[in-house]
Image (spheres, rainbow, N blue to C red):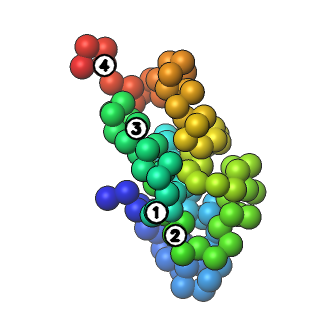
């Protein structure tokens, strides 16, 4: 469920040719929240749980098994660790930064279209 990678002919072809990059995995039609993860990352699991609790939909890109993902991740987001979270294409950091955004109410302001209705 969480290991969603956009399936397109371009992505599939690049993957077969060994030419894919993290940016290829991030599509312009992606959800407002995209999170780069690995399967055995406790902070990734915690970030997923926070999004689910807040009823914010998100897309994950699983980097498990990607040989040089840290350098590409740094070029895309400015961070080398996972999770790395993008909101509307803008890197916001990892789990620690996500919790600060949630605690201060900024997360819901950044995502008014996905924030749950009050009283829900």
Closer to the observer: label 2 or label 1? 1
Where disc 4 sits, the SS reads loop
Closer to the observer: label 1 or label 3? 1
Mark 1 vs mark 3, CA separation in Å:
18 Å
Pointer 2 with pointer 1, Cβ within 8 A: yes
- N-terminal label among 4 and 1: 1
> Relative to 40, is 46 above or below?
above
Q: Which mark is residue 40?
A: 1
- N-terminal label among 3 and 2: 3
Please provide percent x and percent y for residue 55. 33, 33
Mark 2 vs mark 1, CA separation in Å:
8 Å
Badge 3 is on which residue? 51
Q: Which residue lies most toward the bottom here?
A: 17
Q: Residue at x 47, y 52 (%)?
A: 42
Q: Which mark is residue 117?
A: 4
Q: Which residue lies most toward the left here?
A: 120
> Residue 97 is drawn in which quadrant?
top right
Is the residue marked by circle 4 packed among few (<14), some (14-19), or many (20+) residues within 10 Å? few
Where disc 2 sits, the SS reads loop
Q: Residue at x 41, y 37 (%)?
A: 50
Where disc 3 sits, the SS reads helix
Badge 2 is on which residue? 64
């Amino acid at each position: 469920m969480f290991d969603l990678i956009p399936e397109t002919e371009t992505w599939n072809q690049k993957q077969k040719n060994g030419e894919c990059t993290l940016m290829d995995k991030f599509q312009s039609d992606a959800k407002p929240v995209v999170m780069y993860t690995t399967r055995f990352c406790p902070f990734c699991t915690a970030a997923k749980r926070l999004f689910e609790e807040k009823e914010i939909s998100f897309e994950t890109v699983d980097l498990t098994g990607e040989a040089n993902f840290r350098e590409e991740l740094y070029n895309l987001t400015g961070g080398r660790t996972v999770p790395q979270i993008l909101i509307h294409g803008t890197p916001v950091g990892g789990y620690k930064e996500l919790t600060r955004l949630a605690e201060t109410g900024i997360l819901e302001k950044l995502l008014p279209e996905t924030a749950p209705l009050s009283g829900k």
